[in-house]
Amino acid sequence: MSRVLVLNGPNLGRLGSREPDVYGDQDLSALRVLLIEQAGPAVEIDLRQTDDEAELIRWLHEAVDTASPVILNPAAFTHYSYALRDAAALVTKAGIPLVEVHISNPHAREEFRHSSVISGVATGVIAGFGFDSYLLALRVVAPVG
């Protein structure tokens, strides 16, 4: 069985109640169910969320050490965390896919959200499709039959 790390940054633990007009009304538990259903029995979905930048960096180091593909929603860290960017670069430089995802379309929001320090080192970026952004990323990092 292969494993995919689905890593979520700050405030995403509040999905379902935080700005439902932007992020929808489903929470991370609902996302986990959708991902598991799409992945099938051959892929383990390891979904995590933290508000702690250092913990997110440690999880990216774990991805390198275990050669686990990553779906990463860096949330607010997207726009300024060079430390997170460097950890993401370790993943892709090791030849491990890392797809940056966003539930909303950052380019249709406030100007400060238009830039990502992660995108330049990610394998790819998928944004603006709600939870389908994660499902599309899963198709990239763990293609199934």
Image (cartoon, helix red, strand yellow):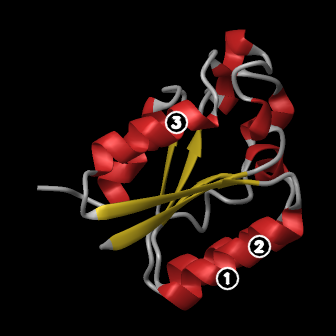
> Of the residues under marks 1 and 3, which one precedes in the sequence?
3
Which residue occupies 38% across, 51% down?
138
Please report contact status of discs 2 and 3: CB closer than 8 Å, yes or no.
no
Cα distance between the residues tagged 2 and 3: 22 Å
Residue annotated with mark 3: 31
Cα distance between the residues tagged 1 and 3: 24 Å
Disc 3 element: helix
Please report contact status of discs 2 and 1: CB closer than 8 Å, yes or no.
yes
- Residue 96: give x, y in percent of width and height: 45, 78
- Say which of 135 and 86 sits in front: 135
Can you name the residue that lies furthest to the left here?
145
Which residue occupies 67% across, 82% down?
61
- Describe residue 81's horizontal placement relative to residue 132 as left or right: right
Q: Image quadrant of residue 111?
A: top right
Say which amino acid is labelled 2.
Ile
Q: Nearer the viewer, mark 2 or mark 3?
A: 3
